[in-house]
Amino acid sequence: MPRSATLALLFSTSCCCLLLIAYSLRLRGHLVAARHEARHDELTGLPNRRAMLAHLDHMLRDPAHRVAVLLLDLDHFKEVNDEYGHAAGDSVLRHVAVTLTRTAPLRTVVGRMSGDEFLIIVDGDADTARKCAQAATNALANATITLRWQPFHCHASIGLATTGPGHRTPTELLAQADAAMYAAKQAGGGVREYHPDLTDLSRRTDNDRRRFR
């Protein structure tokens, strides 16, 4: 084979190899992006419900591991959407996400569950969770966002539940935090810890919940 033909073949082969490498890297990038999108909330960038449940399930596999969850529901968020529009509501949600992330201590994970509900998973006992809840409450109250040239302070109702005998699944623990959060919402906000008397409060309809938003 003439030298020129050999060089042309080598050049063509090299180009094909480079194209295949570039295509492979592109596919890998798309795969990484897809995996990230599947586990993160598009609006806030926080871990989404699927990711939070998976993380909580992993932590609960060790019976000796103390875990607490804080379920936060923003107070009067529906009024923000109604008065200022959904774009303003989205700004509030992003503001809350940044505030909670900055406030959260080490060994905690902050995520958005849905709508205006956020979840903080605390790697620790009830005392650690109480401090985290108080820090989140103070941070939200002190952080200001401007809506139509008016300062707006975020407030949340927070339900706290801690692992103990008899509840080792994410569903059970979140149901307890949800009942405590609903009790806090009924009381006008703040932090409420779960106890067995709150169990019946978790059996409510969506209309019941909307009355307190």
Image: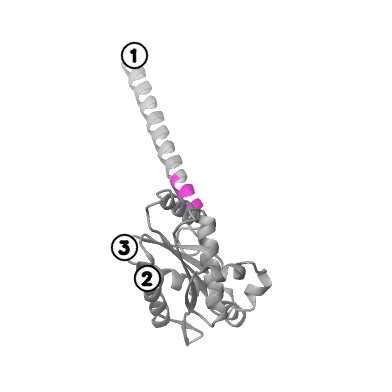
Question: Could you tell me what secondary structure mostly forms the magenta stretch?
Answer: helix
Q: Amino acid at mark 2?
A: Cys
Q: Amino acid at mark 3?
A: Leu
Answer few, some or many: residues within 10 Å of disc 2's Cα (few below 14, many 20 plus, some between 14 and 19): many
Query: In which quadrant of the rendered image does the C terminus lie?
Result: bottom right
Front-most of 204 and 166? Answer: 166
Residue 184 percent location from the top left of the image? 52, 77
| Residue at mark 3 to residue at mark 1: CA–CA distance | 67 Å
- Comparing labels 3 and 2, the label whose residue is closer to the camera: 2
Q: Which residue is mark 2?
A: 132
Q: Earlier in the sequence, mark 3 or mark 2?
A: 3
Horizontal side of residue 169 vs 22, given as left or right: right
- Which contiguous range is marked in magenta? 32-39
Q: Which residue is mark 3?
A: 106
* Residue appearing at x 49%, y 69% in the figure: 194
Query: In which quadrant of the rendered image does the N terminus lie?
Result: top left
Front-most of 204 and 117? Answer: 204
Q: Amino acid at mark 1?
A: Pro
Residue 23 percent location from the top left of the image? 44, 37
Front-most of 80 and 109? Answer: 109
Horizontal side of residue 6 vs 32, given as left or right: left
Q: Earlier in the sequence, mark 3 or mark 1?
A: 1
